[in-house]
């Protein structure tokens, strides 16, 4: 049954799904999203679809549970999710296969993600201070040396960036404000790997700073917490529970106002 671009197929064995889906894809132009019951099925279908269609096919990973401490999170999942966002933004013919629990998780508005990417080209002009601010707003962590994805470092006229969708970090060397060279490099040896003409740096987190969106989110979150706190007070609930909720509300408000702890704010991406 098809309605408004949605096709629902039932009664098909697993071995027939990919060939049938590939035929449907050939008849239709544009991006395709397949939703399946589990991550195992998603990975299997993505492999088969890539073989039958020859098109770029990605798996949208399942999200980890809410409120998992940032230090305990699997950053590989974030990388995979951002890779999907990047592919959807870049490739008009890409295919995404998602398990149900990955598909229901809210993601940032496409325009917000698209508008925050940074284009750097050899010979172009680059304001180092503006780049630092942009990278921080895009969720990158500034460190003395880059040793992992989602980090950047500035040493004199050198800016190192490790985008979450890249295999190796990128080193940008400036002559005053002109981009003198762009190279990927090995973190362990610091040796150059490949010289690039340009690089597109995408956000390192699913949430990127947007004043209007953050302001609206703060208002919604405050309303939800305040309503819950008022309800508990009417029911004369344990004072410590109420106090913890009040502290949490203030903490989240501070994060939003100060553009701090963006990874923790991903728990509230629905707002």
Image (cartoon, rainbow, N blue to C red):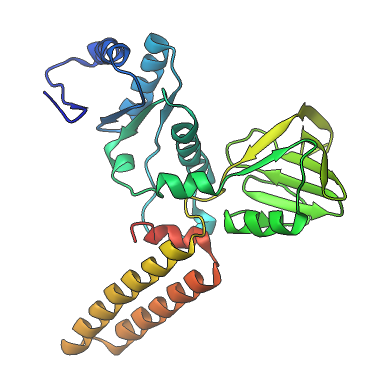
> x%, y% of residue 154?
79, 54
Vertical relation: 135 (above or below) 31 = below
The answer to whether residue 68 of the structure is visible from this angle is no
Which residue is more in the foreground, 124 or 260? 124
Q: Residue at x 76, y 53 (%)?
A: 127
- Which image quarter: residue 92? top left
Instruction: Tell me where residue 226 appears, x and y as whole percent.
Output: 28, 80
Is 8 above or below relative to 232?
above
- Quadrant in which the C terminus is drawn: bottom left
Relative to residue 240, is residue 91 drawn left or right? right
Q: Quadrant of residue 104?
A: top left
Decide if residue 2 is on the left or right side of residue 206.
left
| Residue at image location 29% in from the left, 89% down from the top | 239
Residue 25 visible in the picture: yes
Residue 198 rendering spot, x and y as whole percentages: 71, 33
Counting the numbered discs, the total is 0
Q: Residue at horizontal 38%, vertical 48%?
A: 107
Name the residue at 11% across, 23% down: 1
In front of the other: 97 or 214: 214
| Horizontal side, residue 87 vs residue 20: left or right | right
Q: Is residue 14 left or right of residue 151?
A: left
Q: Position of residue 233 (x, y in %)?
A: 22, 88
Q: Is residue 175 above or below residue 99?
A: below
């Amino acid at each position: 049954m098809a309605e408004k671009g949605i096709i629902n197929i039932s009664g098909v064995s697993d071995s027939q799904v990919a060939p049938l889906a590939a035929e449907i894809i050939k008849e239709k132009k544009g991006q395709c999203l397949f939703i399946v019951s589990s991550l195992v099925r998603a990975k299997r279908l993505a492999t088969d679809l890539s073989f039958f269609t020859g098109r770029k096919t990605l798996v949208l990973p399942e999200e980890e549970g809410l409120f998992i401490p940032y230090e305990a999170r699997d950053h590989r999942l974030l990388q995979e999710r951002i890779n999907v966002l990047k592919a959807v933004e870049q490739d008009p013919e890409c295919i995404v296969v998602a398990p149900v629990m990955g598909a229901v998780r809210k993601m940032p508005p496409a325009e917000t993600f698209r508008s925050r990417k940074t284009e750097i080209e050899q010979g172009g002009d680059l304001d180092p201070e503006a780049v630092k601010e942009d990278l921080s707003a895009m969720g990158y962590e500034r460190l003395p040396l880059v040793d992992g994805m989602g980090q950047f470092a500035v040493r004199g006229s050198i800016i190192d960036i490790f985008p979450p969708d890249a295999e190796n970090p990128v080193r940008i060397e400036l002559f005053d404000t002109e981009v003198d060279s762009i190279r990927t490099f090995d973190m362990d040896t610091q040796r150059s790997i490949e010289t690039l003409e340009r690089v597109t740096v995408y956000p390192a987190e699913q949430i990127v700073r947007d004043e209007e969106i953050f302001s609206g989110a703060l208002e919604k979150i405050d309303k939800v917490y305040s309503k819950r706190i008022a309800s508990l007070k009417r029911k004369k609930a344990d004072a410590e529970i109420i106090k913890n909720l009040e502290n949490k509300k203030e903490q989240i408000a501070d994060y939003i106002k100060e553009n701090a702890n963006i990874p923790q704010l991903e728990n509230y991406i629905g707002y």
